[in-house]
Every structure is written in C-alpha cells, then in structure tokens.
Image (spheres, grey):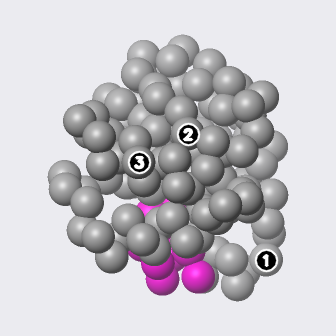
Amino acid sequence: MKALIVDDSRVLRQYMRQLLESMGLCCEEAADGIEAIEVLHGASSFDFMLLDVNMPGMSGLECVKTLREQGLQPPMKVMMVTTEADNSYICQALDYGADEFLMKPFTIESLREKLMMIGLAA
C-alpha cells in the first residue's frame, strides 16, 4: 500500500512516515493541500492519504473537498488527522468526503485501528 502524508509540520510528517513504514507501507509527503493536489495529479497513485485539517495555503478541509469534486481516480481513502475535537470540523470533513478522523496525538495502534475501519488492513 502507498500513503500520502499531508501536514505542514515536518516533524509530524516524519513521525507519521515512521509509523506507516514500520507497517510496511510506502509513503510520500506534502506540506499543504496545494502540494498534495499537485502530487496526486502526478504519476503516482495512492491507497490513502493522512490529511491534517489546519494548514496554511489550503486547509485539509478545502483539500478533501477539492479532491472529491475533481473525482480523482482511482478513488482513495482520506483520513483527516487533527487536534480539533469540535464536531463541526468532523461533520464538515465527512460531508466533503473524508472517510475517517484520527485525533492527535495518536499511537501506531490507533492508526492501525483506523486503517482497518476504512478497509485498509495494515
């Protein structure tokens, strides 16, 4: 499986990469929603994306909405990663096409559980 990690924090991207690679996944990174869309329109295809909600330039909410409107093929799972516990963010992200939410801070066990919940056994 291949994942795209999108977060404006380089440290958090590296942490998520470590966790995913320890589960045998291949990873690429993007620093914001704009860069994520550019990567996704490149030659690579991804099974899922870990997408931070709050980022400069293009937020995770704007990014997932844009991707779903563009009908990216093949479709991929989108897991929002955030510290936001406000239900309005969760509802809005789900309305825009996110598949699941992962609250920061998280462990490898919680990440693995969420991946299984969206049908991606890791």
Q: Is residue 96 left or right of residue 53?
A: left
- Name above or below for residue 104 compared with residue 55: above
Q: Residue at x 77, y 48 (%)?
A: 104
Q: Residue at x 60, y 82 (%)?
A: 91
Of residues 121 and 97, the one nearer the viewer is 97
Q: Is residue 58 left or right of residue 55?
A: left
Q: Residues within 10 Å of mark 1 (few under 14, many from 20)?
A: few
Asked whether residue 109 is drawn in magenta, I would say no
**Residue type, label 2:** Ala
Nearer to us: label 3 or label 1: 3
- Report the disc number at residue 38: 3
Structural distance between the alpha carbons of marks 2 and 1: 25 Å
Q: Residues within 10 Å of mark 2 (few under 14, many from 20)?
A: many
**Residue type, label 1:** Asp
- The image shows residue 73 at horizontal and vertical percentages of 19, 56
**Residue type, label 3:** Glu
- The image shows residue 11 at horizontal and vertical percentages of 78, 28
Q: Which residue matches tag 1?
A: 86
Quarter holding the N terminus is top left
Structural distance between the alpha carbons of marks 3 and 1: 29 Å
Residue furthest toward the left? 74
- Report the disc number at residue 43: none
Q: Which residue matches tag 2?
A: 30
Q: Residue at x 46, y 38 (%)?
A: 4
Nearer to us: label 2 or label 1: 2
Q: Which residues are magenta?
A: 92-100
Upstream in sequence: badge 2 or badge 3: 2
Structural distance between the alpha carbons of marks 2 and 3: 9 Å
Check whether the beta carbons of the residues at disc 2 and disc 1 lie within 8 A of each other: no
Q: Is residue 84 visible?
A: yes
Check whether the beta carbons of the residues at disc 2 and disc 3 lie within 8 A of each other: yes
